[in-house]
Amino acid sequence: MMTWPAYAIQKAVLLACLAGVTTAGAHPKPIPRKYSAVHRALILSNDSASKVPELFVTGRVVTVLRFEQPCDRERTKMLGWEGRFEPVECVGKKVLIEPLKDLKPEDRLLLVVTLADGSELPFTVTADEARRDMQVDVYPDLDSEL
């Protein structure tokens, strides 16, 4: 015969296992692990001939851009996002972008982030089958200012 504390512990363990099974089945479609998530630093060049930096996104996953100064919420825009992305959000020094579904690698959207000092920084938002940006820390190229 089982004592009361042993019975209570056994019941708690069983309920925890059942809760884990129920929670695991709650996601309608798991996020594929084929992507390598990247937290990277991006150093921007002041050279006008330099290529516009690319941001690699995937559907239903937020990508965070982090800057050294606050961004201007009113003047930060993505062109052609309607129906494909959640509205772009500026939160202090961060910009959040979230595609509603996966993009194709040939899809290219222009994101212009305007900082508090009026600087406009262009980015190309696209997809890559092998990687995605989770967080991108954006820094000015101090050498190009000299």
Image (tube, rainbow, N blue to C red):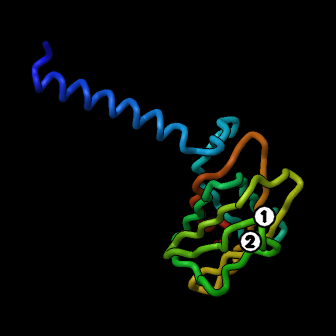
Element type at mark 2:
strand
Query: What residue is at 47 percent from the left and 33 percent from the top?
Result: 21
Query: What residue is at 72 percent from the left and 53 percent from the top?
Result: 56
Query: What residue is at 40 percent from the left and 32 percent from the top?
Result: 18
Amino acid carrying label 2: it is Leu
In this rendering, is residue 34 above or below 117?
Answer: above
Q: Residues within 10 Å of mark 1 (few under 14, many from 20)?
A: some
In the picture, the disc for residue 69 is: none
The reply to whether discs 1 and 2 touch (Cβ–Cβ < 8 Å) is yes
Amino acid carrying label 1: it is Thr
**Residue 31 image point, x, y percent:** 64, 42
Q: CA distance from mark 1 to mark 2?
A: 6 Å
Q: Residues within 10 Å of mark 2 (few under 14, many from 20)?
A: many
In this rendering, is residue 77 above or below 11?
Answer: below
Q: Quadrant of the C terminus?
A: bottom right
Q: Is residue 19 left or right of residue 84?
A: left
**Residue 121 image point, x, y percent:** 70, 74
Instruction: Report how many numbered discs are placed on residues in the image.
Output: 2
Q: Quadrant of residue 43?
A: bottom right
The residue that disc 2 covers is: 111
**Residue 1 image point, x, y percent:** 13, 12
In the picture, the disc for residue 124 is: 1
- Give the farthest residue toward the top: 1
Element type at mark 1:
strand
In this rendering, is residue 11 above or below 92?
Answer: above
Q: Is residue 107 left or right of residue 100?
A: right
**Residue 35 image point, x, y percent:** 68, 40
Sequence-first disc among 1 and 2: 2
In this rendering, is residue 54 above or below 83?
Answer: above
